[in-house]
Amino acid sequence: MVQVVVLGAGLGGTIMAYELRDALGKQHKIAVVNKGSRYSFVPSNPWVAVGWRDRAATEVDLVPVLKARDIALYPQGAQRVHPAEKRIELTDGTSIAYDYLVIATGPELAFDEIEGLGPEGFTQSVCHIDHALSAKTAFDKLVANPGPVIIGAVQGASCFGPAYEFTFILDKALRDAKVRDRVPMTFVTSEPYIGHLGLDGVGDTKGLLESEMRQHHIKWICNAKVDKVEAGTMHVSEFAEDGSVKQTHALPKVYSMMLPAFRGVPAVIGIEGLTNPRGFIVVDKHQRNPKFPEVFGIGVCVAIPPMGKTPVPVGVPKTGFMIESMVTATAHNIKRLVDGAEPNAEGTWNAVCLADFGDSGVAFVAQPQIPPRNVNWSSSGKWVHAAKVGFEKYFLHKIRSGKSEPFYEKLALQVLGIDKLKSIKIDGPKTPA
């Protein structure tokens, strides 16, 4: 009998535990270590921030779900991982040992790297449910006293989709409140162009998103480095292609939501051989750490190099399909190890994304996520909003029911009609489950 521990119970960690239980059966132990006992559906946070959802609608109590699947839960969270000892030190001073560990912590939000950034400073966030609820309070104040708004993503950010989503969701909410005409909006981003998304664009995302910005009367600044944020002003340096400062801006604001850069969480950052200098988990093509082969990494916490040099640092996103692919490959590979074989599954790292704009949206598919690609497709329309709502309902049902059924592969085939996107590829003959 082996014990597999999953560190983190977010989008990747929760379904990781489910897939491990399906792959390994009841004869092995599975445990989840998480800060708290509730799962929060982060993609709903832009809706929470304007009052279209609340906490109860987007959270799941994991205690009964994991108990029903015979998965242990340690809600005190991790203080430090000790990979040389195959042990996790918990925040209450106790420890849990493991035979295999899957790190799925997500990131730490690096608000402190820019003066005045974040909910404790002068900008809002949709990265966490608590942040989104705080943003809703600030939104109510904006409606009562309209003024300039800044939305975007700072230097080093690697998650741009929610910034675009929230821009247009906020636009819709302000139109519904009949105050949009008194709210000038500016999109500020480290991307070299609108629609880059950390992926050098997908299909015609540049044209589609620029068109949407124009139609909604939203100005933008690209190649932007946020220098500092004050109560009523955001100070931004706009860079030219050669890396020189093209222009500086002192942008007035009464409301702002800016996505931060990410880094590794304190429980793992600085462990030599496990993480890169930024604290992200180093993995090979099988999601396995080269120095500590009992450790795997999935999701946003995994180290991926940037697409290429840009005037302002831009990270690569870990999209939903990509995370789902990592999960499936990791479950397969741990099953192989338990059975005495070597890992042979690789995540395909494709991207299938639905960006909701409140009453419409943009969808894109990239196979693989990093170019050159075999599939490079994007589209827009009201159907994207409906699909995103359906995704939310489906995924929360999956979490509540303890199912590990993959979503993105099904979406690509049944909704978008693309039959080439597979979650994993196998180096050799597949071992029966």
Image (cartoon, rainbow, N blue to C red):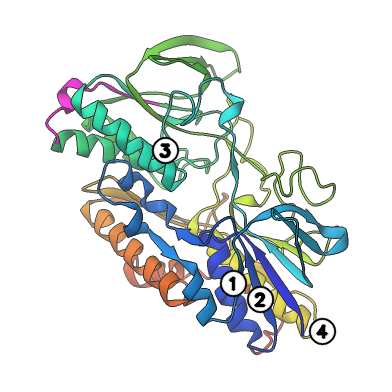
Q: Which residue is mark 1?
A: 17
- N-term-proximal mark, 3 vs 2: 2
> Which of labels 1 and 3 is toward the front?
1
Task: Specify the amino acid type for callout 2.
Answer: Ile
Q: Which residue is mark 3?
A: 195
Report the disc number at residue 425.
none
Position in image of residue 320 (x %, y %): 49, 58
The answer to whether marks 3 and 2 mark residues whose Cβ atoms lie closer than 8 Å is no
> Which of labels 3 and 2 is toward the front?
2
The answer to whether marks 4 and 2 mark residues whose Cβ atoms lie closer than 8 Å is no
Tell me: residue 332, above or below residue 244.
Answer: below
User: Whole-Å distance between the Cαs marked 4 and 3?
Assistant: 46 Å
Task: Specify the amino acid type for callout 1.
Answer: Ala
Q: Secondary structure at mark 4?
A: loop
The answer to whether marks 1 and 3 mark residues whose Cβ atoms lie closer than 8 Å is no
Q: Which residues are magenta?
A: 177-187
Magenta highlight on residue 256: no
Q: Quadrant of the C terminus?
A: bottom right
Position in image of residue 292 (x %, y %): 84, 61
> Which of labels 4 and 3 is toward the front?
4
